[in-house]
Image (cartoon, rainbow, N blue to C red):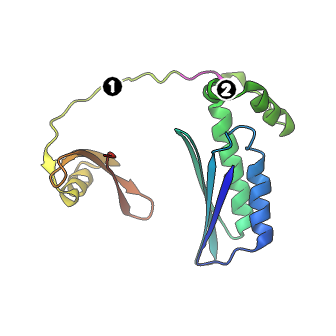
Amino acid sequence: MKYNIVGRKVNLRDNFKERVQKKLGKFEKIYSEDAEATVTVTLEKNRQTVEVTIRDGSMVYRAESTALEMNDALDAVVDILGGQIRKNKTKLSKKIKAESLEQYFIENGTKDDEEALQDEDYAVVRTKTFAVKPLSVEEAILQMNMIGHEFFMFLNSSTNKINVVYKRKGNTYGLLEPED
C-alpha cells in the first residue's frame, strides 16, 4: 500500500507518520499492492481532524474523526475503517483472498457476528422518476435547499450533462460530474 500523509495547518512529526503506517499496515493484507492510502491531518481551533481515504481499484473506504490529539483521532479512524471492512467482509472476500481477511480478523481479536456479516440485500424499495431540467449549479443548489434534500440531480446547462449537487459538512456544497 502506498501512503500519502498530508498536514494542513500542522507540522507532522516522523513518529506520527510511522504510527499511521503501523496502524494502517494491518489493512495491507486486505488490499492489493496498488492500494493508496491518503491521510490528511487538519488543525482547527485546537482540535485535530484525521481523515483517511483508502482507494483500491473501484473500492473506496473513507473515515474521519476529530479529537484534541491527532493520535486519538487516528485510533478512532482506524476503528471506523475496521468496522467498514467487517461490514463488507463478504463482498470483499469475493474480490480478495479469503484467508488473508480471516487472518486479519483473528489477529485483531474481532469476533464474527454472523448476522452483521451476512451478505446484505440491497433491495430497492422505491423508484422515483422526474423530469430533469437544464439548470445552472447555483439554481440546482437553490432547488435542493427549497425541497429540503441532501442531494439533487440535474442537467447542467453549461455542460449539457447530468450532475449531482450535495450538501457537505460545514454548510458547503459538492458537485458530482461524469468523466469524459
Q: Position of residue 119 (x, y in %)?
A: 60, 21
Q: Which residue is mark 1?
A: 126
Q: Position of residue 36 (x, y in %)?
A: 62, 50
Q: Residues within 10 Å of mark 1 (few under 14, many from 20)?
A: few
Q: Are marks 2 and 1 in contact (CB under 8 Å)?
A: no
Q: Amino acid at mark 2?
A: Ser
Q: Which residue is mark 2?
A: 93
Q: Which residues are magenta?
A: 116-120
Looking at the image, tell me whether mark 2 or mark 1 is earlier in sequence order: 2
Q: Is residue 158 left or right of residue 13?
A: left
Who's the residue at 26% across and 54% down the image? 145
Q: Amino acid at mark 1?
A: Arg
Of residues 148 and 18, the one drawn nearer to the viewer in this rendering: 18
When the figure is inspected, residue 98 is found, relative to residue 110, above or below; the finding is above
Main secondary structure along the magenta-highlighted residues: loop
Residue 110 position by quadrant: top right
Magenta stretch encompasses residue 117: yes
Q: Is residue 132 left or right of residue 103?
A: left
